[in-house]
Amino acid sequence: MDILKEELKGCIRYFEDNTNYIEDSLGYGLTRDKYPLSPNIASISATGYSLASLVIADSFGLIDSKIAYNRALNSLKTLYNLKNTNGFYYHYLNYYNGERELNSEISIIDTAILL
């Protein structure tokens, strides 16, 4: 069981280290994609996994519940303000400002992963 707990901690740490938690950032809550190959590129699907990681981290006592709640809430505020088409988001976004990157497409699959 210890190996599974360490794996869980490592996964949570990945999202902690690669999600934009910079206060007042237009990209708050966005999570890097393929880091370190693209440090300024986030993906909407990685952001969905990061939101799920907050719930898991909280349930295992790896993050304070208030911190997890505030991070999730502020991430959802960012998502609310992102450009989208009929509720579907672009696959790649700028990690810092949430703008479309790499001429990416609207992605129904990645939006589904986010949700």
Image (cartoon, rainbow, N blue to C red):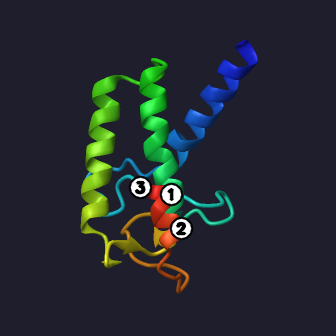
Task: Please give the name of the residue rendered at 29% of the width and 34% of the height, measured from the top-left corner.
Answer: 69
Pointer 1 residue: 113
Q: Amino acid at mark 3?
A: Leu
Q: Position of residue 67 (x, y in %)?
A: 32, 31
Locate residue 16, reporting x and y percent.
Answer: 50, 40
Disc 3: CA contacts within 10 A as few (<14), some (14-19) or many (>=20): few
- Cβ atoms under marks 1 and 2 closer than 8 Å: yes
* Residue 39 x/y as whole percent: 58, 62
Q: Is residue 61 above or below residue 84?
A: above
Describe the element under mark 3 as helix, strand or loop.
loop
Identify the image quadrant of the C terminus: bottom left
Viewer-side residue, 73 vs 35: 73
Classify residue 65 by image quadrant.
top left
Gap in Å between the C-alphas at discs 1 and 3?
Answer: 5 Å
Q: Name the residue type under label 1.
A: Ile
Q: Which residue is mark 2?
A: 109
Instruction: Please determine whether, in this image, residue 73 is positioned above or below residue 56.
Output: below
Q: Amino acid at mark 2?
A: Ile
Q: What separation in Å lies between label 3 and label 2 (alpha carbons)?
A: 10 Å
In the rendered view, would you say 88 is above or below 24? below
Label 3, on which residue? 115
